[in-house]
């Protein structure tokens, strides 16, 4: 299969307002095949979100190449759908208009056909009865489903999801995972799924990229060879436990304590007289 | 009955002050040219013909509302410009702060000299006093937009003007309305200040006129009318928000 997405020796450094450089990514190399579901796990602050912004073209890489279908990403890409951590729907628009928003925003025009498609997407995420409602009338999980429908409206080749279920409770989170798998099988997309849940990554992905501490780099690529569709029973599969253990070991490596000679004396138990 | 009391408790508590006020004035035998009782104020109110009241009321209201509209018309574009351009933000904002921190009451006589005695100086004073809270509220609102939506807009490569119209401005609506509520009461204050300096009509002028002739109950009556008008305008802003932007009122 063709290499659909490629990161070649990508490094990225942010410059803070004070002018100090903060390295976020260091020498990241990986590729994603067409319609592959790739999850990225790693400790917080390891540059996962930077990865997302690089792929969507929102920020240019400081070093290295980001390629989609052999073309370098140099500006924001329209064929990328983004699902954010929070649903970030527009509170003044109905559910239908929220899903239609990308079209309305881009072309200031929405055809009857577009409307039908949007309704189809909302039905696909199981919320066909809520078209006229306002976002605040929906639960967090329902709002995130609408966020997914909105990301699919322009029928993007690539779907980027930035910890999309992290704001949900554990039960809806699991349910949404299976829901996403169903949607992905119905409408195959190349998915970059950022998460900090190890089991979520293994359950959903074809391939898991494990990232190390800042500055983030890919510590290991792990192909997940579990049959699809995956369901509750997959979690009990011994293979599943094996995969999650590999990832866990990578992430919970003992943190390196920065050499600081004073730290021994700065014990919190010691009180100032 | 109980729910009626609960619903109208703010109004009722205000009305409760009136008999108390009357009682104090009667018992302490305060002369009405120093501190009039409510009954004296009512009497003074009806001693003036309604058409005269309307004339003064309209003069004040006209300046206040027109000045308020000018303030809206200028402050929202200024806020948009300041959010869009970092450079203009850095250059315009200090100027606005300097203008705001100069007491309007102190500039008022100068403005009359510069702009003459027509509506222009009055509108300028009203505008100056009411536009700053609007600029601050609108700027804060425009900047409070979730950055995800700005990224969505960028990734769609939509026209920058649509980012303002379809995302940032609607998100700023709750902020703009709190600015409007502050600004409308300030606009009335501005109109009255202008009348204090130079005018031959208006409720502020009428207060000054009445006090200089020791018609204190009449001055109090105009003052009451001013408060009522201010309150009505404030509530009509609330009503506009409730009617057209119901989603922007928090749960």
Image (spheres, helix red, strand yellow):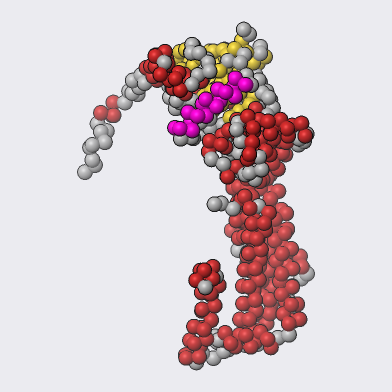
Q: Is residue A144 above or below residue B83?
A: above
Which residue is nearer to you in this view: A250 or B251? B251
The image quadrant that residue A57 belongs to is top right
Q: Give me the residue at 48% from left, 86% from top.
A: B24
The image quadrant that residue B219 belongs to is bottom right
Which residue is nearer to you in this view: B184 or B117? B184
Q: Give me the residue at 74% from left, 73% from top.
A: B58
Q: Position of residue B7 (x, y in %)?
A: 54, 68
In-image side of A170 versus B184 (left or right):
left
Look at the magenta stretch and give its main secondary structure: helix
Range drawn in magenta: A170-186
Q: Position of residue A198 (x, y in %)?
A: 43, 22
Is residue A243 inside the magenta stretch?
no
Residue B132 shows in this picture: no
Q: Give me the residue at 65% from left, 79% from top.
A: B222
In-image side of A209 versus B225 (left or right):
left
Q: Is residue A209 above or below residue B59?
A: above
Q: Position of residue B31 (x, y in %)?
A: 54, 91
């Amino acid at each position: 299969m063709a290499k659909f997405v490629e990161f070649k020796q990508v490094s990225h450094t942010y410059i803070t307002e004070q002018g100090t450089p903060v390295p976020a990514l260091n020498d990241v190399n990986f590729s994603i095949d067409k319609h592959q579901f790739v999850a990225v796990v790693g400790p917080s602050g390891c540059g996962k979100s930077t990865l997302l912004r690089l792929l969507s073209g929102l920020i240019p890489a400081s070093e290295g190449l980001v390629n989609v279908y052999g073309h370098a990403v140099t500006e924001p890409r329209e064929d990328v759908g983004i699902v954010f951590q929070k649903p970030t729907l527009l509170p003044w628009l109905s559910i239908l208009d929220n899903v239609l928003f990308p079209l309305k925003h881009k072309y200031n025009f929405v055809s009857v056909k577009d409307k039908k498609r949007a309704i189809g997407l909302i039905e696909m995420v199981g919320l066909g009865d809520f078209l006229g409602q306002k976002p605040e009338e929906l639960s967090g999980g329902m709002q995130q489903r609408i966020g997914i429908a909105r990301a699919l409206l322009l029928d993007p080749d690539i779907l980027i999801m930035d910890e999309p279920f992290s704001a949900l409770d554990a039960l809806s989170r699991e349910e949404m995972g299976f829901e996403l798998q169903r949607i992905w099988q119905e409408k195959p997309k190349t998915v970059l799924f950022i998460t900090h849940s190890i089991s979520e990554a293994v359950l959903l992905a074809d391939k898991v990229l494990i990232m190390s501490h800042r500055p983030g780099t890919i510590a290991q690529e792990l192909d997940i060879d579990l049959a699809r569709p995956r369901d509750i029973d997959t979690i009990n599969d011994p293979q599943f436990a094996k995969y999650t253990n590999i990832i866990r070991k990578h992430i919970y490596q003992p943190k390196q304590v920065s050499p600081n000679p004073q730290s021994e004396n700065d014990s919190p138990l010691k009180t100032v007289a | 009955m109980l729910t009626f009391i609960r619903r109208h408790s703010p109004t009722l508590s205000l009305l409760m002050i009136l008999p108390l006020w009357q009682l104090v004035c009667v018992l302490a035998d305060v002369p009405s040219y120093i501190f009039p009782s409510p009954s004296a104020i009512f009497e003074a109110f009806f001693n003036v013909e309604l058409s005269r009241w309307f004339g003064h009321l309209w003069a004040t209201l006209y300046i206040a509302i027109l000045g308020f509209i000018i303030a809206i018309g200028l402050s929202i574009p200024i806020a948009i410009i300041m959010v869009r351009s970092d450079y203009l933000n850095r250059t315009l904002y200090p100027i606005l702060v300097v203008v705001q921190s100069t007491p309007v009451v102190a500039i008022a006589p100068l403005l009359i000299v510069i702009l003459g005695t027509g509506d222009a100086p009055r509108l300028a004073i009203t505008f100056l006093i009411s536009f700053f809270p609007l600029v601050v509220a609108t700027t804060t609102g425009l900047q409070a937009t979730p950055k995800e939506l700005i990224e969505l807009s960028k990734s769609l490569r939509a026209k920058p003007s649509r980012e303002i119209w379809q995302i940032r401005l609607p998100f700023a609506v709750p902020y703009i309305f709190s600015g409007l509520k502050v600004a409308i009461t300030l606009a009335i204050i501005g109109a009255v200040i202008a009348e204090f300096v130079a005018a031959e009509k208006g409720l502020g002028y009428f207060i000054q006129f009445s006090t200089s002739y020791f018609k204190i109950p009449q001055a109090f009556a105009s003052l009451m009318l001013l408060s009522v008008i201010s309150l009505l305008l404030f509530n009509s802003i609330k009503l506009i928000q409730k009617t057209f932007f119901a989603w922007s009122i928090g749960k």
